[in-house]
Amino acid sequence: MSRRPVPCRMAFAALLAGLTFAPGLNAQTQAKSPVTAHFEVPRTRVYLGETFPMTLVIRSDDIQLDKDIGLNGMPDEATLERSGAAELPVTRQQVGNRNIETRRYRFDVSPKRLGPVRLAPVLGINVVERRGLVRFQKSYNLRVTPLTLTVLPVPDAGKPADFSGAIGDLVFDVSLSPTELAPGDLITARLQIQGAGKFDNITIPRFSPDGHFKVYDPQPLEEETTPARHVYTQILIPQSTNATQVGSIGFSYFDANAGRYRTVTRGPFALRFKQREKQAEERYRPVTVKSRWETSPAARTALALALYWIVVIAIVAPVLLSLRTGDRRRMARRAATGIGLLVVCALASVPYRSAIDRTLGAAHTATATRQVPARLAPSVNALESFTLPKGAAVRIDEAWEDWVRVTHDTRGGWIPASAVELR
């Protein structure tokens, strides 16, 4: 019976299983295999505590690999701390009749001990094979080309006194807002550190207090902070209009690529003071404007007298209208009665008016219970018109929410309703 030929793919996979992925193969043999793996780093001399990228590169030559891979035998976290792998875009290239595929996985790593650190992990991969319409996988182990890192301490020579502890290729930016301000305004300083490297658990740069400013400690701006960017804000309060500038601020870090310390200085920042803008009085006026009849005591007195005479006329009118009927003697008596009523009502209106004046005046006369500023509108932000002394007699002209408009002598203004007491 004749023997069935072994498919080319199966024979190739057998070659891989028997030769290429055998543990302990030297680098020269592995370099000739259809699948290779190695690490790429910016440099092999690194510094303790710095964070730098490391890329695992897997190259397959006319072999289809499954996406799932495993990486075993890496140094422990106490030796080399690393982040999760981020898969970069796959590149494919046609070379003759072969398909070359390159996969890259990026880690952020940080050495945690001094001395040499050897990386020689084993990569677990799955080779995809097909038999007709059937697709299946076979697992193999591949030795990654060894890599040795030399971990150095950050040098003491040239270290600035204000070294922040940051290591890497970093950028430091500072902005202040506002720089054109009125007395009493707060200044917010935005401090931003970004780039590739280690800049967590560092000494945060800050503006130092002096005689012209009161400063607060920097606070992290969590919503804008990412692993590659840290943002802080610091509040500064000018103590006088003589504070014409905010001094410079420095940030010192170790540039691992250059192997030297760097200090970045930002500032000084010029300030310009301006007069605070006056608030428009109309902004604080009541929505409904009361009429003069509602706010004037004299108008209310006139209204009360008018109602009084309407009632008098309503009483006397029937008597006067009856003069057209009856004999002369009866008409004369009725005329005398009507005239008498008018005279009596006219005389009675004098004490009535005095009583009205006393009542209305008492209802709208008050005493200031404390010294308080009278303002142009019912708001604490409105401009001050004059100062009302404690115990001053005032007339209440209008009320709105928790405010009353008062008149003292010839001046008027708005004060809190709690600052007066009715007499």
Image (cartoon, rainbow, N blue to C red):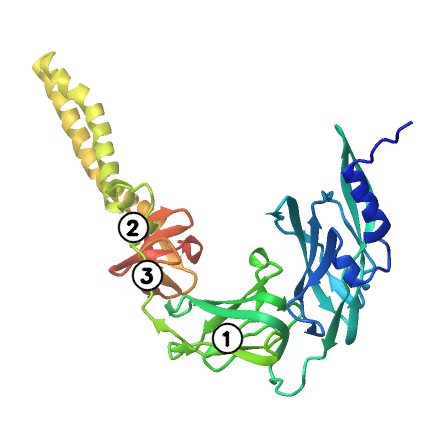
List the residue tagged with mark 2.
Answer: 282
Disc 3 secondary structure class: loop
Disc 1 secondary structure class: strand
Report, in whole angstroms, how far the alpha carbon at label 3 lies from the one at label 1.
27 Å
Q: Point out which mark residue 214 bears.
A: 1
Left or right: where 56 falls relative to 78: left
Give the residue type that dot 2 points to. Glu
Give the residue type that dot 3 points to. Leu
Disc on the earlier residue, 2 or 1: 1
Q: Nearer the viewer, mark 2 or mark 1?
A: 1
On screen, 168 above or below 330?
below
- Name the residue rendered at 14%, 28% in the picture: 339
- Name the residue rendered at 74%, 71% in the picture: 149
Disc 2 secondary structure class: helix
* Residue 21 in sight here: no
- Name the residue rendered at 83%, 44% in the picture: 14
List the residue tagged with mark 3.
Answer: 383
Structural crowding at the residue carrying mark 2, measured as other residues with C-alpha within 10 Å and reported as few (<14), some (14–19) or many (≥20):
few
Q: What x and y, as percent, mark residue 62?
A: 69, 45
Disc on the earlier residue, 3 or 2: 2
Structural crowding at the residue carrying mark 3, measured as other residues with C-alpha within 10 Å and reported as few (<14), some (14–19) or many (≥20):
some
Left or right: where 405 falls relative to 168: left
Report, in whole angstroms, how far the alpha carbon at label 3 lies from the one at label 2.
12 Å
Give the residue type that dot 1 points to. Lys
Left or right: where 30 falls relative to 201: right
Q: Nearer the viewer, residue 154 or 283?
A: 154
Disc on the earlier residue, 3 or 1: 1
